Image: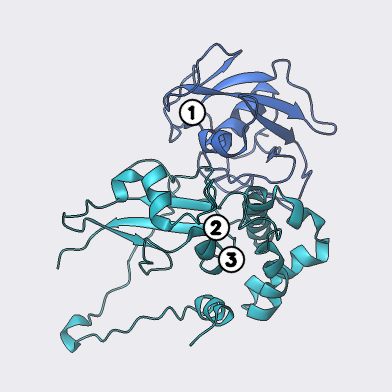
Amino acid sequence: MTDDKDVLRDVWFGRIPTCFTLYQDEITEREAEPYYSFPEKDLLHCPSKDAIEAHFMSCMKEADALKHKSQVINEMQKKDHKQLWMGLQNDRFDQFWAINRKLMEYPAEENGFRYIPFRIYQTTTERPFIQKLFRPVAADGQLHTLGDLLKEVCPSAIDPEDGEKKNQVMIHGIEPMLETPLQWLSEHLSYPDNFLHISIIPQPTD
Amino acid sequence: MAEEPQSVLQLPTSIAAGGEGLTDVSPETTTPEPPSSAAVSPGTEEPAGDTKKKIDILLKAVGVTPIMKTKKWAVERTRTIQGLIDFIKKFLKLVASEQLFIYVNQSFAPSPDQEVGTLYECFGSDGKLVLHYCKSQAWG
C-alpha cells in the first residue's frame, strides 16, 4: 500500500495511476504545424529564465499568503527559495520537497491551512479562472471536500444526482473523487507552485 | 530616435512578473479588454457586491517611485494587472520601456494576466485592495 510520500513522488514524475492501451488504428501520425504565430492575447511571453523564476516564486508566495498568511515562506531564507526553484528546474524531487514540505505544514491546533490555494478553469466562460477564499475545515471541524468547494464556487460544475454526467473535474489529468478532503488534495496533489489547478471539461462523448 | 515598440521587453537580469505579454506597447492597438476611460475612475461611490461593479484600489508608492496624486481608484473587476500597470505608467508619464512592479500584501507580484477582482476577493480588506507599486523590484 503506497503511503502519502510515495504518492507525492509519483505525481512529481508524472506517474499518475492510470492504465490504457491504444489500438493500432488509434495511433495517427501528424504533420508538424507549418506556421506558428505567437498567440499574444492568450499567452504571456517568457523573456528569460529569471522571469520564470520570479513568476514561479510569486505564485508560491501567493499560495502561502492564503495558506499561512505568508508566515512560512517569509521565514525561509533566500537560499531556501532558491532551492525550491532549482529543485523544480532540475527535476530534483528530494531537493524540492526538502523545502516544500514546510509549506505543507500547519499548526497543531488547526486541522489544515487557513485557506486553500486553488484555481478552477472552465471552457464555458471568458473568465481566466475562479479563485476565491475557501477554508479547508468547516465551523464544526468537518473537513471540506472537493465537492463542497465546487458547490460553493462553481455549482454549474456539479452534475445533478440522477442526471447524466456532464463534466469531468480534473486535476493532473485524473478525476479525484468529489468526496476527497480538500486539505489532502492541497497537500498531495498541488502543482509545484502549491496551487490546485482544477479543470472542468465537458464529458467527452465517444 | 524613438524606439521601436517591442512585443517582448528587454528586461534586466533580475526580473519580476511584470513582463510585457498581453497588450502591445503601442497605445494605438487594441487591448484584450475594451478600452474604456471609465474602467479606472477616481474616488469611489460604487456599492460593492455585483460582479459587474467596480472595486476600490488604493495605490501606494514604494521607494523613490513617484507618488500618484490620486491614490484611490474604482476599477472594474475584470481589469488585469497589466492593464493597471499600463494605466499607472501613463498617469505617471513613465516611458514604455520603464518597468513598473505591483505587489499584493507587500509580498508577491501577481501575474500580469490576473484580474483585480480576484485579488480583491482573496486579499482585499476594509472594502479595498491595497497595491504597492515600484519602478524596481521591491519584494523579489
Left/right placement of residue B87 relative to residue A81 reads left
Kind of residue at badge 1: Glu
Kind of residue at badge 3: Pro
Q: Is residue A150 above or below residue B46?
A: below
- Residue B13 can be seen, yes or no: no
Chain letter of disc 1 in the image: B
The residue drawn where x is 36% and y is 47% is A151
Letter of the chain in blue? B
Residue B6: mark: none
The residue pinned by badge 1 equals B28
The residue pinned by badge 3 equals A192
As helix, strand or loop, the secondary structure at mark 3 comes to loop
- Residue A142 can be seen, yes or no: yes
The residue drawn where x is 21% and y is 63% is A204
Left/right placement of residue B25 relative to residue A35 reads right
Chain letter of disc 3 in the image: A
Q: Is residue A72 above or below residue B25?
A: below
The residue pinned by badge 2 equals A195
Kind of residue at badge 2: Phe
